[in-house]
Image (spheres, helix red, strand yellow):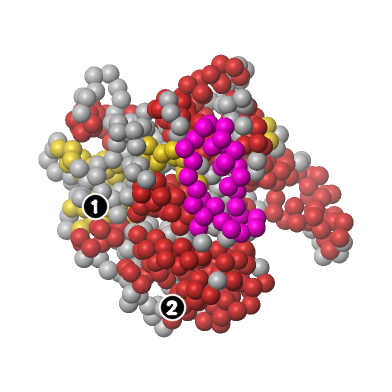
Amino acid sequence: MQAHDLPPDTPFASGAPRFAGAAPDPLAAWQQAYATRGSRCAADVGGEFAVALDLPGGGSYLAVDRFAVHSLCYAVKDGQLHYATRADVLARRLGITELSTQAIFDYLFHHCIPSPRTIYVGIHRLPAAHYALFKDGQLTVAPYWTAQFTEQASPDFDTLRDEFRGILRAAVKERLTGDGKTACFLSGGTDSSTVAGLLGEATGRAPASYSIGFEAEGYDEMAYARIAAKAFGADHHEYYVTPADLVKAIPDVAAHYDQPFGNSSAVPAFYCARKAHDDGYTRMLAGDGGDELFGGNTRYAKERVFHVYSQIPSPLRAGVLNPLFMNPLTGNIPLLKKGTSYIRQARVPMPDRMQSYNLLDRLGLRDVLTPQFLAAVDTDSPRQHQRATWAAGPHDASLVNQMLTFDWRYTLAENDLPKVVGTTALAGVDVSFPLLDTRLLDFSLKLPTSYKLKGLKLRWFFKEALRGFLPDDILTKKKHGFGLPFGPWAVKDAALNALAADSLRGAAARGIVRPEFVENLLTKRLKEHAGYYGEMVWILMMLEQWLRRHAPDYRIAA
């Protein structure tokens, strides 16, 4: 058996099996683990990893970590399993040029392309916590780990708090580089502030923190980053992104990803990482994951409110509530409209309810997309993907925990983590995620649901356990992050508007979107509500910019 580096587009990722008698060398440990434990050996691995093993007698074994921080793409061709860390690299290696129109629709729906599909026909991406085994000409792809929640019935808060803080300290300390060149992102939120404070503790000196600001009302959160930086005595660095920065960076950021990717925070994250790189830092610690492990997203509270409806006895729902609110007469009475809206949404089953405000649906598929594009795709496929993921989740868990595991896939593995990993790589620095440490994940599985969402209070335990460590202003602030004021800037800045308009008209010329929709979006809707419609402008712009670099001849057949 041979364990080896992945193809040369990126180095072998960290992480090795941990069990009694494991070999000290990571590659040797993987060999030993597979020899003794087979295809599910990756369940013994902590940390962020991607691995490829050549098996005795032929065949291959691939695996990625529980959040797919490190990526692996694969394809079967000529009786062999081929793989790389990037879909575009594998496509070039195998001579694959055909793009998946369905993947483009998935991108427009999700703003990313969820695994296992990629933009290239015949190339797949290994989902988080999955392995791929190719043996005797047969390919098996399956999870090696699934979440099992074991909520403590009578927890002792002080004991859990001390354990939690100990894990956090170890997770940060173990991610430091040996050369002392570790910095951190600092948005001023709970997660990034925690990482910044612990980085200072671990190094014994002022933590190097990097923040991004925007000269735009309602978007700049630099004040909170400064509060955290002052509290922890950070060596704090700030960069204010401008519209000119966007015009300069958008083509390169879009093209850097191995397939279309639409998270608008990617550009500010890139500038943040590049500033750290220019200052000589080789690794950054990011705070992603705290919301998804400990219940910090606002939709968790919102969905708990909707869930109340399903707990009302069926006779009461059918005999009283539905007739009162769900009819054309009373449903339009101003005092009853909110109740009608509530019941209408509450009756939508999970996880479809979480897509109630999907931008593509709100704008209207037939109004946005061309008939020839729609004829080439299954418009229900993205929802089917999410339904399958939800169905494969922990059925015996609370609603909050079911949503958490769902977000591990769609919010973290498919969106936020690729954003940070991709942009830091483009900036030339490494990145790691201490709040996604395997020990912290395991710790979160035993917390009572009420410790995550206490009534409608988000992240109750996380915040209470860090009270006295984090400044009170940070504990009480609303979640923001590096939100980008693209829409308002695209209206006011001529160069950015020109880039957006040229990109959207390019997407229309390919037969993806209707030309009349593009013109209406650019000349009317964007001006009416820049923040809301700016999101669709961004998604289409990043798609077109990616296609220009990777598939300039792509067209939808008329």
Horizontal side of 408 relative to 133 (left or right) equals right
Residue 299 placed where, x, y %? Answer: 63, 46
Residue 280 placed where, x, y %? Answer: 34, 44
Mark 1: amino acid: Asp
Q: Residue at x 43, y 81 (%)?
A: 509
The boundaries of the magenta stretch are 212-241
Q: Residue at x 48, y 45 (%)?
A: 237
Q: Is residue 243 above or below residue 273?
A: below
Crowdedness near tag 2: few (<14), some (14–19) or many (≥20) residues, C-alpha within 10 Å: many
The residue positioned farthest toward the left in the image shown: 57
Mark 2: amino acid: Gly
Residue 457, by quadrant, is top right
Q: Secondary structure at mark 2?
A: helix
Residue 399 placed where, x, y %? Answer: 61, 39
Magenta residue check for 220:
yes
* Disc on res. 506: 2
Q: Secondary structure at mark 1?
A: loop
Magenta residue check for 74:
no
Q: Which residue is mark 1?
A: 9
Mark before the other along the chain sequence, 1 or 2: 1
Residue 112, by quadrant, is bottom left
